[in-house]
Image: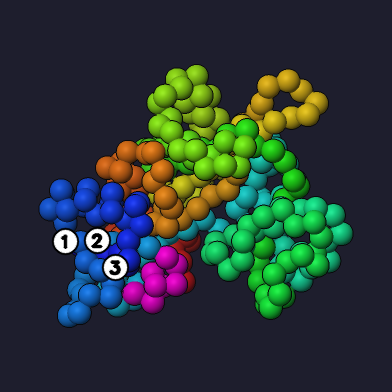
Amino acid sequence: MLVMPGRRTSTMELLAAEAAGRGMAVRAAEAPGPLAGPAHWYGGPVAGARLADRLGFALLEPADDWLAELPEEFTGREVRAATVADAGALQRPTFVKPPRDKSFPADVYADGSRLPAGLDPATPVLLSEVVTFAAEYRLFLLDGRIAAASRYAVFGRLDPRPIGADRTVAAEIAAFVDRLVAAAGHTLPSAVVVDVGQLLDPYRPGHRWAVVEANMAWFSHVYAADPARVLDVVLRAAGPRKRVRPGDLPYVRH
């Protein structure tokens, strides 16, 4: 069974249709009547955490500081794990984002005084040097390999496109991911989303590849990726707790 919120996004509709085509029951979390496992989840982290014990599924997600712990070879910029209190002391433009939820908008803040008011000072954040990505791509990884992929933005503006439309780009991304997985694949769950981008370098012509961020597969938009292959990743990333592989146990959301 695939459970998701009753108010569906375009991604939810695509995944629901694919799941139904495989013979899975698709249920709304708010639907009347009992819900019983084994179940898989696609939806937000708050509702997912509320339902996880009741329906017996486990939510896999990367560690909050995963991006900050990557070598700069893969990030292409300085990234550090911090708190809202640290971000509030910033005195120069910095990209600030919550590592897992959407508690405030991820954006470039001119200084710490521009952060939204009322945030808990202890809230974890990622602080990143401001850079320019010419294009950004969403990769659904399963067992360290790209299962599905899509471009989703160009110079920060939403512009989804199938990754297969440009074979050169697809080959470059595949090579970059192979290097990333070889170096840091053991620090990710077996089903996860990694966004990468073409990072413009003002001191060199052309671009280089860098990791934008890592995300939970069970709360990531499909964009122009193949929904069938995306669903394969989602089912592993948010499925029955009893089926969680030993290597994924450290990445189960609590």
Measure how far apart labels 1 and 3 are at the Cα level: 14 Å
Instruction: Please state the horizontal and vertical placement of residue 236, each as a whole percent of the image.
Output: 33, 53
Q: Secondary structure at mark 3?
A: loop
State the residue at coordinates (57%, 36%). 154
**Mark 3 highlights which residue?**
6
State the residue at coordinates (55%, 64%). 102
Q: Residue furthest bottom?
A: 33
Quadrant housing residue 107: bottom right
N-term mark: 2 or 1: 2
**Dominant secondary-structure state across the stretch colored magenta:** helix
Q: Residue furthest right?
A: 91
Colour pattern of the rendering: rainbow
Type of the residue with mark 3:
Gly
State the residue at coordinates (67%, 75%). 119
Q: Nearer the viewer, mark 1 or mark 3?
A: 3
The residue closer to the viewer here, 89 or 7, is 7
Q: Nearer the viewer, mark 2 or mark 3?
A: 3
Q: In the figure, is residue 54 to the left or right of 46?
A: left
Quadrant housing residue 156: top right
Which span of residues is magenta-colored?
Answer: 44-51
Residue contact at pointers 2 and 1, CB within 8 angstroms: yes
For residue 130, above or below residue 26: above
**Mark 1 highlights which residue?**
25
State the residue at coordinates (80%, 67%). 113
